[in-house]
Image (cartoon, rainbow, N blue to C red):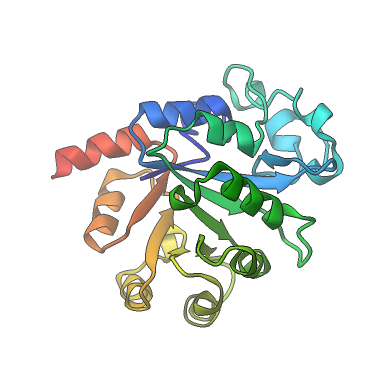
Protein backbone atom coordinates (compact mmCIF):
# COMPACT_ATOMS: atom_id res chain seq x y z
CA UNK A 1 0.00 0.00 0.00
CA UNK A 2 1.05 3.57 -0.66
CA UNK A 3 0.48 6.30 1.90
CA UNK A 4 -1.58 9.10 0.31
CA UNK A 5 0.41 12.32 0.80
CA UNK A 6 2.06 10.36 3.57
CA UNK A 7 0.07 9.05 6.52
CA UNK A 8 -2.21 12.03 6.08
CA UNK A 9 -4.87 10.91 8.56
CA UNK A 10 -2.30 11.13 11.34
CA UNK A 11 0.06 13.92 10.23
CA UNK A 12 -0.17 17.00 7.99
CA UNK A 13 -0.29 15.92 4.37
CA UNK A 14 2.77 16.07 2.14
CA UNK A 15 5.12 16.98 5.00
CA UNK A 16 8.21 15.24 6.32
CA UNK A 17 6.30 14.18 9.43
CA UNK A 18 3.59 12.54 7.28
CA UNK A 19 6.14 10.58 5.27
CA UNK A 20 8.06 9.49 8.36
CA UNK A 21 4.79 8.41 9.96
CA UNK A 22 3.93 6.39 6.85
CA UNK A 23 7.22 4.52 7.15
CA UNK A 24 6.57 3.95 10.86
CA UNK A 25 3.14 2.51 10.05
CA UNK A 26 4.66 0.02 7.61
CA UNK A 27 3.58 1.50 4.28
CA UNK A 28 5.23 -0.04 1.22
CA UNK A 29 5.68 3.45 -0.17
CA UNK A 30 4.28 6.93 -0.35
CA UNK A 31 2.31 8.98 -2.83
CA UNK A 32 3.09 12.68 -3.03
CA UNK A 33 2.40 15.73 -5.19
CA UNK A 34 4.98 18.02 -6.76
CA UNK A 35 4.85 21.47 -8.35
CA UNK A 36 7.38 24.16 -9.18
CA UNK A 37 7.32 27.47 -7.34
CA UNK A 38 8.20 30.82 -8.90
CA UNK A 39 11.94 30.38 -8.26
CA UNK A 40 12.02 26.94 -9.88
CA UNK A 41 12.34 24.61 -6.89
CA UNK A 42 10.34 21.36 -6.92
CA UNK A 43 8.10 21.54 -3.86
CA UNK A 44 5.87 18.86 -2.40
CA UNK A 45 2.35 20.27 -2.19
CA UNK A 46 -1.04 19.28 -3.57
CA UNK A 47 -2.95 22.56 -3.81
CA UNK A 48 -2.32 25.27 -6.37
CA UNK A 49 -3.28 27.91 -3.80
CA UNK A 50 -2.46 27.79 -0.09
CA UNK A 51 -5.93 28.79 1.14
CA UNK A 52 -6.84 25.40 2.61
CA UNK A 53 -3.40 24.40 3.80
CA UNK A 54 -2.14 27.66 5.28
CA UNK A 55 -5.05 30.16 5.27
CA UNK A 56 -3.04 32.23 2.79
CA UNK A 57 -4.34 33.36 -0.58
CA UNK A 58 -1.03 32.64 -2.31
CA UNK A 59 -0.64 30.89 -5.62
CA UNK A 60 2.16 28.38 -5.22
CA UNK A 61 3.49 28.83 -8.76
CA UNK A 62 3.78 32.59 -8.20
CA UNK A 63 5.48 32.36 -4.79
CA UNK A 64 9.27 32.07 -4.26
CA UNK A 65 10.74 29.25 -2.21
CA UNK A 66 12.09 31.58 0.48
CA UNK A 67 8.49 32.50 1.34
CA UNK A 68 7.01 29.02 0.95
CA UNK A 69 9.54 27.40 3.26
CA UNK A 70 8.29 29.54 6.17
CA UNK A 71 4.60 28.67 5.78
CA UNK A 72 2.87 26.55 8.44
CA UNK A 73 0.77 23.87 6.74
CA UNK A 74 0.23 21.81 9.89
CA UNK A 75 -1.75 23.98 12.28
CA UNK A 76 -4.56 24.86 9.83
CA UNK A 77 -5.19 21.12 9.37
CA UNK A 78 -5.34 20.49 13.11
CA UNK A 79 -1.82 19.15 13.58
CA UNK A 80 1.42 20.50 15.02
CA UNK A 81 3.14 23.16 12.92
CA UNK A 82 4.82 21.77 9.80
CA UNK A 83 6.40 23.17 6.66
CA UNK A 84 6.28 22.45 2.93
CA UNK A 85 9.30 20.32 1.92
CA UNK A 86 11.29 20.15 -1.26
CA UNK A 87 11.15 16.85 -3.15
CA UNK A 88 14.86 16.53 -2.46
CA UNK A 89 14.16 16.67 1.30
CA UNK A 90 11.58 13.89 1.09
CA UNK A 91 13.87 11.61 -0.92
CA UNK A 92 16.54 12.20 1.70
CA UNK A 93 14.43 10.92 4.61
CA UNK A 94 12.73 7.94 2.96
CA UNK A 95 14.45 4.56 3.40
CA UNK A 96 15.75 2.72 0.34
CA UNK A 97 12.97 0.12 0.40
CA UNK A 98 10.25 2.76 0.14
CA UNK A 99 8.47 3.15 -3.21
CA UNK A 100 7.82 6.78 -4.21
CA UNK A 101 4.80 7.61 -6.36
CA UNK A 102 5.43 11.17 -7.52
CA UNK A 103 2.38 12.90 -8.97
CA UNK A 104 3.27 15.67 -11.41
CA UNK A 105 0.73 18.43 -10.71
CA UNK A 106 0.16 20.50 -13.82
CA UNK A 107 -3.05 21.38 -15.65
CA UNK A 108 -1.55 23.06 -18.72
CA UNK A 109 0.43 21.90 -21.72
CA UNK A 110 3.46 23.88 -20.53
CA UNK A 111 4.78 22.56 -17.21
CA UNK A 112 7.41 25.27 -16.61
CA UNK A 113 10.21 22.74 -16.23
CA UNK A 114 8.50 20.52 -13.66
CA UNK A 115 8.93 17.19 -15.45
CA UNK A 116 12.52 17.87 -16.46
CA UNK A 117 13.46 18.91 -12.91
CA UNK A 118 11.92 15.79 -11.39
CA UNK A 119 13.54 13.46 -13.94
CA UNK A 120 16.90 15.16 -13.30
CA UNK A 121 16.56 14.66 -9.54
CA UNK A 122 15.65 11.00 -9.98
CA UNK A 123 18.69 10.41 -12.17
CA UNK A 124 21.04 12.34 -9.92
CA UNK A 125 19.87 10.47 -6.82
CA UNK A 126 19.83 7.10 -8.58
CA UNK A 127 16.31 6.24 -7.42
CA UNK A 128 14.69 5.31 -10.74
CA UNK A 129 13.98 1.74 -9.58
CA UNK A 130 11.97 3.10 -6.64
CA UNK A 131 9.85 5.67 -8.47
CA UNK A 132 6.53 5.79 -10.32
CA UNK A 133 5.75 9.09 -12.02
CA UNK A 134 2.01 9.67 -12.35
CA UNK A 135 -0.12 12.51 -13.64
CA UNK A 136 -3.57 13.43 -14.91
CA UNK A 137 -1.67 15.42 -17.53
CA UNK A 138 -0.62 13.29 -20.52
CA UNK A 139 1.86 15.95 -21.65
CA UNK A 140 3.87 15.44 -18.45
CA UNK A 141 3.97 11.70 -19.09
CA UNK A 142 5.02 12.24 -22.71
CA UNK A 143 7.83 14.49 -21.52
CA UNK A 144 8.90 11.86 -19.02
CA UNK A 145 9.07 9.23 -21.76
CA UNK A 146 11.12 11.52 -23.97
CA UNK A 147 13.56 12.40 -21.19
CA UNK A 148 13.94 8.94 -19.64
CA UNK A 149 11.82 6.17 -21.21
CA UNK A 150 12.83 3.61 -18.60
CA UNK A 151 11.05 5.44 -15.79
CA UNK A 152 7.74 3.92 -14.76
CA UNK A 153 4.78 6.07 -15.79
CA UNK A 154 1.20 5.89 -14.57
CA UNK A 155 -1.87 7.71 -15.86
CA UNK A 156 -4.23 9.10 -13.26
CA UNK A 157 -7.85 8.56 -14.22
CA UNK A 158 -10.17 11.57 -13.97
CA UNK A 159 -13.66 10.32 -13.02
CA UNK A 160 -15.24 13.39 -14.63
CA UNK A 161 -13.88 12.46 -18.07
CA UNK A 162 -14.60 9.51 -20.32
CA UNK A 163 -13.19 6.44 -18.59
CA UNK A 164 -13.09 4.24 -21.67
CA UNK A 165 -11.14 6.83 -23.64
CA UNK A 166 -8.66 7.39 -20.81
CA UNK A 167 -8.11 3.72 -20.08
CA UNK A 168 -8.18 2.24 -23.57
CA UNK A 169 -6.97 5.03 -25.86
CA UNK A 170 -4.86 7.46 -23.86
CA UNK A 171 -3.21 5.03 -21.45
CA UNK A 172 -1.39 2.94 -24.10
CA UNK A 173 0.06 6.15 -25.52
CA UNK A 174 1.47 7.64 -22.33
CA UNK A 175 2.04 5.02 -19.65
CA UNK A 176 4.22 1.93 -19.45
CA UNK A 177 3.42 0.75 -15.94
CA UNK A 178 0.11 1.57 -14.29
CA UNK A 179 -3.31 3.17 -14.26
CA UNK A 180 -4.38 5.13 -11.19
CA UNK A 181 -8.19 5.23 -10.97
CA UNK A 182 -10.36 6.44 -8.10
CA UNK A 183 -11.78 3.61 -6.02
CA UNK A 184 -15.34 4.40 -7.14
CA UNK A 185 -14.43 3.80 -10.78
CA UNK A 186 -12.64 0.51 -10.13
CA UNK A 187 -15.28 -2.03 -11.08
CA UNK A 188 -14.28 -5.66 -11.63
CA UNK A 189 -14.91 -5.29 -15.36
CA UNK A 190 -12.68 -2.23 -15.70
CA UNK A 191 -9.96 -3.73 -13.55
CA UNK A 192 -9.94 -6.86 -15.71
CA UNK A 193 -9.76 -4.76 -18.89
CA UNK A 194 -6.91 -2.61 -17.61
CA UNK A 195 -4.97 -5.61 -16.36
CA UNK A 196 -5.47 -7.32 -19.73
CA UNK A 197 -3.60 -4.37 -21.23
CA UNK A 198 -0.61 -5.36 -19.10
CA UNK A 199 -1.02 -2.45 -16.70
CA UNK A 200 -0.85 -2.52 -12.93
CA UNK A 201 -3.58 -0.68 -11.05
CA UNK A 202 -3.16 1.78 -8.17
CA UNK A 203 -6.52 2.75 -6.64
CA UNK A 204 -7.12 5.94 -4.69
CA UNK A 205 -8.17 6.72 -2.00
CA UNK A 206 -8.88 3.48 -0.10
CA UNK A 207 -9.27 3.75 3.68
CA UNK A 208 -11.76 0.91 4.18
CA UNK A 209 -10.31 -2.52 4.96
CA UNK A 210 -13.13 -4.44 3.28
CA UNK A 211 -12.72 -2.37 0.11
CA UNK A 212 -8.97 -2.90 0.14
CA UNK A 213 -9.48 -6.64 0.55
CA UNK A 214 -11.83 -6.76 -2.46
CA UNK A 215 -9.40 -4.78 -4.57
CA UNK A 216 -6.53 -7.04 -3.56
CA UNK A 217 -8.55 -10.10 -4.59
CA UNK A 218 -9.24 -8.40 -7.93
CA UNK A 219 -5.53 -8.08 -8.59
CA UNK A 220 -5.04 -4.41 -7.73
CA UNK A 221 -1.33 -3.81 -7.14
CA UNK A 222 -1.47 -0.72 -4.92
CA UNK A 223 -4.07 0.79 -2.63
CA UNK A 224 -3.35 4.46 -2.00
CA UNK A 225 -4.56 5.23 1.51
CA UNK A 226 -4.58 7.95 4.16
CA UNK A 227 -4.35 5.24 6.86
CA UNK A 228 -1.58 2.79 5.96
CA UNK A 229 -1.20 1.38 9.47
CA UNK A 230 -4.90 0.66 9.94
CA UNK A 231 -5.19 -0.84 6.48
CA UNK A 232 -2.15 -3.05 6.96
CA UNK A 233 -3.43 -4.39 10.28
CA UNK A 234 -6.92 -4.91 8.89
CA UNK A 235 -5.66 -6.86 5.90
CA UNK A 236 -3.52 -9.06 8.16
CA UNK A 237 -6.61 -9.96 10.21
CA UNK A 238 -8.51 -10.62 6.98
CA UNK A 239 -6.03 -13.24 5.79
- At 53% from the left and 40% from the top, the residue drawn is 5
Which quarter of the image is occupied by the N terminus?
top left
- At 25% from the left and 64% from the top, the residue drawn is 218
Against 66, residue 226 (above or below) is below
Could you tell me residue 238's position as x and y percent?
16, 43
239 sits left or right of 103 in the view: left
Q: Residue furthest left?
A: 239
| Residue 85 seen | yes
Could you tell me residue 149's position as x and y percent?
55, 67
Which quarter of the image is occupied by the C terminus?
top left
- Give the camera-side residue of 172 and 6: 172
Could you tell me residue 59's position as x and y percent?
82, 42
221 sits left or right of 130 in the view: left
- At 52% from the left and 45% from the top, the residue drawn is 126
- Give the camera-side residue of 59 and 160: 59
Q: Residue furthest top?
A: 80
Could you tell me residue 17's position as x and y percent?
53, 24
Against 14, residue 69 (above or below) is above
| Residue 13 seen | no
47 sits left or right of 213 in the view: right
Please give the count of numbered marks on the rendered protein.
0
Query: Where, by quadrant of the figure, is residue 106 drawn?
Result: bottom right
Amino acid sequence: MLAHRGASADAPENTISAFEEAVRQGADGVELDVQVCSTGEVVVCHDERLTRLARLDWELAATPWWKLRRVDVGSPLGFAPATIPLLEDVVEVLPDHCLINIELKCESVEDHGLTAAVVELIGRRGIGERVILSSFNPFCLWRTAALEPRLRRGLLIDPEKNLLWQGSVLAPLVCNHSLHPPYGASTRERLARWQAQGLRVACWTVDDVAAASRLKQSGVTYCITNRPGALREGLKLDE
